[in-house]
Image (spheres, rainbow, N blue to C red):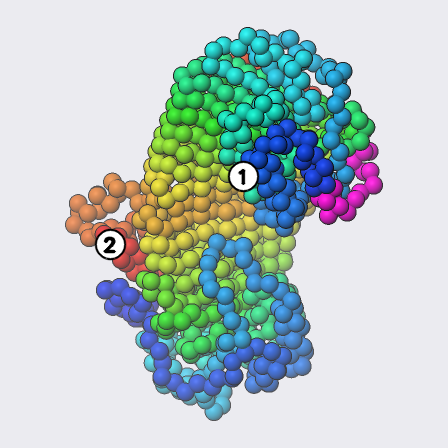
Amino acid sequence: MVEVLDAPAAAGSDAVAHLLDRARGLAERLPGARHPVVAAWRARGAETFASQGFPTRRVEAWKYTDLALLRETRFEEPILAADIRPPLDLEEEEGPLLVLIDGRVRRDLSAVSHLAPGVAIASLADLLRARDEETVAGLGGLAPETLPLPALNAALAEDGAVVRIADGVDGGTIRILSYATARAGHPVAFHPRHLIRLGRGARLVLVEEARGEPEAFAWQNVVSEIQLGPGARLIHIRLQDEPLSAVHTATLAVRVEQGAEYDSFTLIKGARLTRNEVHAVLAGPHAALHLNGAQLVDGVRHADTTTVIEHAAPDCASRQTVKTVLAGRARGVFQGKIHVHRAAQKTDGYQMNQALLLSPEAEIDAKPQLEIYADDVKCSHGATVGELDLEALFYLRSRGIPEAEAKSILVQAFLDDAVSLVADEGLRERLHAETLAWWQRVEHGG
Amino acid sequence: MPAATDTLETVRDVTEGGYRWGFETPIEQELIPKGLNEDIIRLISAKKEEPAWLLEWRLKAFRAWCAMEEPRWAAVRYPPIDYQDLHYYAAPKRKAQPKSLDEVDPELLRTYEKLGIPLREQERLAGVAVDAVFDSVSVATTFKEKLAEAGVIFCSFSEAVREHPDLVRRFLGTVVPPSDNFFAALNSAVFSDGSFVYVPKGVRCPMELSTYFRINARNTGQFERTLIVAEEGAYVSYLEGCTAPQRDENQLHAAVVELVALDEATIKYSTVQNWYPGDAEGRGGIYNFVTKRGACRGAKSKISWTQVETGSAITWKYPSCILQGEGSVGEFYSVAITNNRQQADTGTKMIHIGPRTRSTIVSKGISAGEGQNTYRGLVRILPKAQHARNFTQCDSLLIGDRCGAHTVPYIESRNPTARVEHEATTSRIAEDQLFYCRQRGMTEEEAVGLIVNGFAREVLKELPMEFAVEAQKLLAISLEGSVG
């Protein structure tokens, strides 16, 4: 499956032209095609992508991540196959679940009936076909569509999850599972667009998973637009665990209104290449943001977390702890920018990113960045890079703990600084289990 | 020390604010025509009676420059520079090379006295050897004989080309290649003078060496080039100061500094940069686009950069260390102030190549008025840099709500045994600190000066004594008008 990646490469501009061809060919058939606002939105996306193409490493935001893999591949749309069932036990957990296979919502696999009042979960494609004006109005409202990948998503977005929680409603926990199969046997690309909206004082726990076992090269280029009304609170857990035949580029745009809180944890266990880009705006006073996460990267994988936090209003707080563990020939990237606008007095910003290198062939590149235009602020960032503490290792070994286990303990302890920030015990345990499973994969050379 | 006292006096004179180094010296100038092309470069080279290899070297740099684009990635904004509208060579007129200070134009000496750099007194009393560069050429170097006794070569760059061509040829452009970047290429093509220092094996330079740079002529750019070589076990401490007249138009300063430290050699390079910063509305001021780099070639060699950047309308400067020798050490200590409309984008690069290399970065940025201050730095650990170590501390202080403070560190590590730590903070002067000082009868400006000096203390203590006192005063002066 991996050798697909080395398939004959088309020229860079060919790949762009091919994607634009797809966009033109599908323009009449994509959901909402006959709605003038949707059609104009898609056309704008195609135009932006046409003028920029895939970002190269000469673009500052892509200095450390090369998209050659995408530039050199001809992607087709995934085939529609109603018989594909992911090898997962979907009934394992209670509560609403939306399943996407190769970017399309599968109602037959999802569990979105019997929702509580004020909770709505739907397929974007369905809503666009139904000319749902609220959905149309929400498209592209937050995502940075002047950037090429979100623009391409706009041009080709076919489906996605739409979640709405009404004012004052506690939406409980909702799960979204995105599974890649690339059943057709040729490289496929899909561009899900999720729209998440919490009304005034609403609450929700959203657990998003990206998995898959694609038979061919699969590129998921997802855009999520998340809007939190005043006083709303969203706990957002994202877990991505995809094989070497997958490339995952995600752009998440979050707008946090007055007194609202966005609390997220993203666990990346990889695809061949992952780019997790977050653009968060603290738009009203006393809004709070937690952008925590861990990148567990092994083998030849490449994981890149790039975040931009905009403090646009006074009295807001942002907290970010991101840990990266690298094994094999892996490469990790962290780019985190905190931008404090002139109006954002009394900003409290904190960012910490730490990387652990476990192999002489691994590489970490970090670029924490502060851009500050207000004076009454408290902002700090810290970054560390290093290996396992040899003294701590010796201490454990001197107490009779075998080396492999001692290492495992230290890696888990390193990650725990970030994972322990997840307040919900059940979710935290699950993340622990995921990090342990990753470590076993590394130990057994998986 | 009298010289230091004199400098102090000069600085103490400045009580009502403003740029006190802004006078112009009415001296007869020799200017070559405006513009930049191969003929101008040939003319500069001919005026300096340079050997053919150096002219070729310049022309090669010029051709590379023609194909290069001006860098745009720094967080600084300025109107396009017309590189054809500048004089690339300006020199005080004189008949022959001065043999001693007695032959130097007295008007020039008075200029340096006004600047607080009394060359004569310094020669006799201060024990600091000075090379003074006026516009494009070096006008006087003091203490030559005493240095020569120790085997230290300290002279103008032109003189070095004449007297020590082999040494110059061996090291020139080996740290900053002629086509390294846009401004370095420009400098390599048109550089007119600068300082050259060579400290032979095992010699500890008996005194601090100092260069004073002065831009005087109108519509000129200053392009000096400094090359310092410390042979095995040598030690040298080098100081650099700069001022320019007050003018409404911007002037370009694009210098290149190359340092080479061989086995167990140490070079300490200190700068107090006080080029004219422009007025409160942002008119005039120097564009300071400088490439400074040191190569720690030998085992256990050490290069330490200390800079106090208070002047210039725009600063674009990243004194860096290439840590090649096993166990070599790089240091960067910086205070940068931007007030009014000043913009500074400054920082360092620490490239860890050899095993057990170590680097320390301490950067203090102070923004006031509408100033924009950016720390931009790179720490790169290459695969062979076993057990390399870096510590970086970047702090920013904001005074007023119309300025900006930015931190852009790049950290790249390819060796698991290396440890890199980076910390950055941004805050403003605490109200309680101000209140405490005010309550004890200090004016607000005095209080700010005191607090800022405390903020910058870790860097100021790295400066040689004479400079430290001057730098402290400069910090306070640079911030005048930023509070209240």
In the image, A167: left or right of B46?
left
Decide: few, some or many residues near mark 2? Use Cα within 10 Å; few <14, some 14-19, many ≥20. some
Q: Position of residue A285 (x, y in %)?
A: 35, 32
Q: Residue at x 38, y 82 (%)?
A: B108
Q: Chain of mark 1?
A: A
What span is colored magenta in the figure?
A1-18
Q: Residue at x 76, y 15 (%)?
A: A83
Q: Position of residue A157 (x, y in %)?
A: 63, 31
Q: Residue at x 52, y 58 (%)?
A: B319
Q: Position of residue A312 (x, y in %)?
A: 40, 38
One can see residue A234 in this view: yes
Query: Is residue A10 shown in magenta?
Result: yes
Tell me the number on the disc at residue A329.
none
Tell me the number on the disc at residue B445.
2
Q: Position of residue B95 (x, y in %)?
A: 47, 91
Disc 2 residue type (three-letter): Glu
Disc 1 residue type (three-letter): Pro
Query: What is the secondary structure assignment of the residue under circle 1?
Result: loop
Q: Which residue is mark 1?
A: A144
Query: What is the secondary structure assignment of the residue under circle 2?
Result: helix
